[in-house]
Image: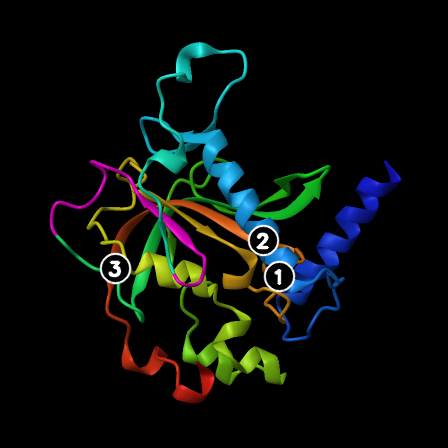
Amino acid sequence: MKKIFLYILVGSLCFSACKKDDEIAFYTETRDLTNQNGDDDQAIKKFMDENYLDAAGNIKPFSATDTADDHEKKLSQLNPVTLPSGTIYIMRDGAQPAVSNPIQDKDIIRIMGRAYTFLSRNNNGVVSFIEQAGFFNTIEGGSTVPVIDPMYYYTKKKVMDDATVATAKKASYYQIPGFREALQKFSAFNLPDEAPYNLQGVIIVPSRAAFARNSFYPYLGIDYSNRSFVFNFQIYGRENRPADQIQTPEQQ
């Protein structure tokens, strides 16, 4: 019980730091980067073999006791594409916009879905994702509308202009490169916020294509060092970004 209170206290302190530009000193993994990257890739492979997409596109784990999901295809069987960064994306068949509306690098987006972050660990030769933590969720918990223009996709110029420490003046402090890279392979819908969701895909970002071991914005007060991300999403809309919000070359 004491540990629970301690975690809550730490989390609240980290969350309060979101209102500032102060950097948070988190524990840094000492493992060799080659081993870290290898563990991430193995954990991702295991994750894709152990999960499938349901009728609405939600990621679901296969049941060890219920045969109802025996006919479902693993994520690894849904034509995953691996990008140069190691990020993997899956486009769900039959769940893409009828009209092509490609997502661009500087777009404002509206995103529905869930995202989780994980550590990868080797336990007696079996590498798996552990320590799941939520990153965003617009499906459960009372919020059923898309998130508009999240900073982890694109950070407005003013955010970095107003920052008071050097690391917070760079887009890499806020953005998840692998997510940005993969999302631009998708097209956006043109849906009202109240439209029912039908998730269009999955993006899995290894830690090296996320924040790796660099400084990062303390979203939700979690230590994102060495953490991989899994996005299960639908883009409800996109629009061109106003010129005064676009990052300068020095901020990119």
Asked if labels 3 and 2 touch by Cβ distance under 8 angstroms, the answer is no
Q: Is residue 127 left or right of residue 110?
A: right
Q: Amino acid at mark 1?
A: Thr
Mark 3 or mark 1, earlier in chain? 1
Q: Disc 2 marks which residue? A: 38
Quarter where residue 68 is shown:
top left
Inspect this view and state whether residue 226 appears: no
Asked if labels 2 and 1 touch by Cβ distance under 8 angstroms, the answer is yes
SS type, badge 2: helix
Q: Residue furthest right?
A: 2
Q: Residue 34 bears which disc, if any?
A: 1
SS type, badge 1: helix
Q: Where is the N terminus found, in terms of image quarters?
A: top right
The percent position of residue 63, horizontal first and vertical second, equals: 51, 19
Q: Residue at x 64, y 67 (%)?
A: 213
Q: Residue at x 48, y 75 (%)?
A: 171
For the record, the magenta segment spans: 84-99
The percent position of residue 135, horizontal first and vertical second, equals: 54, 49
Q: Is residue 88 left or right of residue 212?
A: left
Q: Residue 238 bears which disc, if any?
A: 3
